[in-house]
Amino acid sequence: MKMTLLFRWLLLVCAALIATPKTKAADANPDPPAITSANVTTNGQKRLSWTPYPAAAQYQLLSKTNLAFPFSSDSAGTISGYTWTASNDVPASFHRVQVTPLSSNEVFVAAVLNRLTYGPTPEELDRIATIRPQAYIDEQLLPESLNETIDTDPPITNAPPPPPPTVWAYISVTGIVPNNPVNTNVIMYLNGAGHVYIDDIQVAYGTNTTQGTNLIINGDFESDFAPWRATGNFANSTLDSNTVHSGNASLHLIGTAAGANADNGVYQAFATNPPPVNQKMTVSFWYATVPNTTPINLIVRLSGSQTITNVPLPVLPPIPPQPSLAASIVYSKLTNAAAKLEDLRAWHVLHAVRSKTQLLEILTQFFDNHFNTQYDKSKQWFDDNFSNSVTNDNDRQKLATEFEFREISKWRQVLIDPNGTFYDMLKISAESPAMIIYLDTVLNKKGNPNENYSREVMELFSMGSDNGYTQNDINAMKYAWTGWQVTKKSPENANNPFAPRVADLTNDVGIWVLHFNTTDHSTIAKTIFSNSVVESRFPAPYAGVNYSLVLTNGTGTNGMRDGYQMMSHLANLPYTQEYISVKLCRVFVHENFDYGIYDYNAPNLAPEVQLIKDCMRAWRTPAADGRQGNIRAVLREIFNSALFRGQGASQQLVKSPLRFAAAAIRSLRATTTDNGVYTADTDGYGITSLPGGSTSPLVRMGNMTLFNRPEPDGYPETGRLWLNTANLCERMRFCEHLLMNTSAGSKSTDYGSAGVKNISDPVGLLKARVPSASWNDAGALVDFFLSILYPGEGKANLDLDRSAAIDFLNLDETNPPQASAFSLLSPTSAGYDGRVRGMVALLMTFPRYQEH
């Protein structure tokens, strides 16, 4: 797939992401492009450069030689990307850059699919063009009406036609021992990267191996690998029990590059002394080909190269993507408390990639990140923090996972409720055993109060750092949560915080849930926000209002009301409305929103300030059930804003590692048949959790350990924290593996065998959607993939990317690559498949694909 060439393009990506000027943050009508440099180059050409304009369909240079004249189109030069060049013979002129924006509807479509989903799929691009973007928004805001069956759909059983049957071929070759005999090893290798199966090898004196004594041991690979040795580029070769000529196993010869000899191949020493000079010797074996991306030869020889065979391996068509793991299988484990962290992560990713209720998935991730808890701390608590500890590590893993899944399940119930409010989400978080353990509320007792939760519930979960509270409020509030603990209760008492725990924590059936211990609760009167008045910067009806709160719920079970009264008060404070609205705007519009500084009463409010003010108005407007803080009302305000719908909304946010991985698969994911097999897919595990201690793609792309972040602030909403050279290299690496053919040797060896868990078939996708007459048209194919990878970005801003991708298609896979016309390749060949895969992987490394 010409991956060495991809690395060369990475420098371009890094430089562009750092240096490309950005438009003013998401202005509905951004500033026009500005000329940034004008000079005469060393080759005598004039050159002008300018800043990009978001979603630009066309740039045009205007000029005039006299300021008294009007500007007119300048046809003397050439525009490439954001640069115009012309001969130095062109007269000195005044210049202006004119831009033709993409249509507002095209930009709006892209904003909807990039922000309300984990990334557009080809099928969603088709559908939104039919139903229009507003209908898509309305649909996503009603997830309960979409009939999502992802967690109940059974695994796909009607798989596509199987790959071609394994055909074994027999080879026998005879040679003469030379005058300087060194024929003591039998050696096997390929002359390039690829793989093949070999079985029943024999080496004998004479011309017929079926009659002579076999000089090698374990030629049928029945008794383990020894005494064979795999070296150099063939060190990953192994035995295979699924593809055999006879017996129980064969040799799966796997090469990452060309072999040469015993130090770079698979070999066995069959003699301690050289055979006699002029002795005839014969080597025979059976081999079976498998799909290889390029034509390669199998070489089997004796050392000295006299007895040798060079077998061209036929190039077989790629194996189509196979049906992947059904979400229902993982969901069943989760709902039966039999899942581990890797299962929850896989389920989360499967929903991100496959679910119809995409906005629900985005919001699930947002609130899980906002109310961050840590799996590791829950798991450790089961081992350390009470007398009847859980000693079985498998059980600890399942219990800690169940805590995380329980949070997510309850948040999703609120999000599919039209009347769901922020208070509902805050209440779920406060009652969650994972949160009670994570922020040490479980240790919070009247004689030894702990302030961790009271600090973070204001700083991170409701009001925002230093936004309307002081350290005195933290000290006062901590007593409200004394007595909130976790214990194991019988199932019928799971929702009763006052019920006793089970008698035997180790053996009795039960569920670990919230428990209120009345003896540990502080009954003193608690005054929070003492004499505090809402700042004058807030609009009516808030400015000047006293928001002090006194908690006097007393003793016994009544004391638990302190916490609920505190949550109810926090949930609808103007500071909370501001902070949560800002965070939602950062997710759906752009990251340059702030809190704690805006004067909402000032004239001529900036668009960002006006949007937050509008969100706060929607928040305090009672919904159908009479309550404030309706989540959908705030979202509708954001989605109806000019900032969300305007020209400047294009490409304003950077994808997180999770968003990037899900978007990469979704970009190429479409059905080409009626059997439910998609042209790109994942089993979830290949993105988030790898076997054998291998580091997962999400960790490599930015240390994103879902459900296990140690810090309470959640993963960042600012793109600059995700972007550095190492993370960009890993994004490219992920795309490289996603785009590899499933038959490629390194597809299954790197990432801890994760490669085959993330699959794609870009050629199958293009053949289903591009007329056959254009299959060998490099420009047409690049335009097709640009249209699905970069919807809402004008062709003028993709000019350089398009040229680079076309150049890539017209290079072969040698090292260094050589010019080779793409138009001459057969669309059924492995070479065609490899070039298309490499080109798509290249497009996914460019700057704008990191953005959304």
Image (cartoon, rainbow, N blue to C red):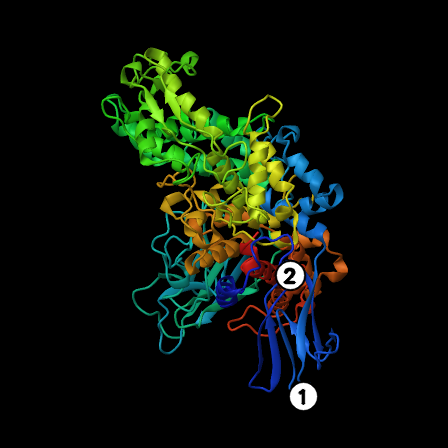
Residue 795 in sight from this viewpoint: yes
Query: Cα distance, mark 1 to mark 2?
Result: 49 Å
Circles 1 and 2: CB atoms closer than 8 Å: no
Residue 392 in sight from this viewpoint: no
Q: Position of residue 201 (x, y in %)?
A: 45, 57
Residue situated in front as seen by the camera: 562 or 505? 562
Quadrant in the picture for residue 212: bottom left
Against 464, is 8 above or below? below
Against 487, is 813 above or below? below
Q: Position of residue 390 (x, y in %)?
A: 29, 25
Instruction: Give the crowd class for mark 1: few <14, some 14-19, many >=20 residues within 10 Å.
Output: few
Against 517, is 59 above or below? below
The N terminus - image quarter: bottom right
Residue situated in front as seen by the camera: 340 or 267? 340
Task: Name the amino acid, label 1.
Answer: Asp
Q: Residue at x 65, y 29 (%)?
A: 147
Q: Position of residue 556 (x, y in %)?
A: 33, 11
Task: Name the amino acid, label 2.
Answer: Ser
Q: Secondary structure at mark 1?
A: loop
Residue situated in front as seen by the camera: 363 or 222? 363
Residue situated in front as seen by the camera: 456 or 471? 471
Q: Which residue is mark 2?
A: 829
Drawn side of residue 836 relative to residue 816, left or right: right
Q: Secondary structure at mark 2?
A: loop
Task: Tally the numbered discs.
Answer: 2
Q: Position of residue 290 (x, y in %)?
A: 55, 54
Against 477, is 162 above or below? below
Q: Which residue is mark 1?
A: 89
Drawn side of residue 783 relative to residue 393, left or right: right
Task: Choose the circle earlier in sequence order: 1 or 2.
Answer: 1
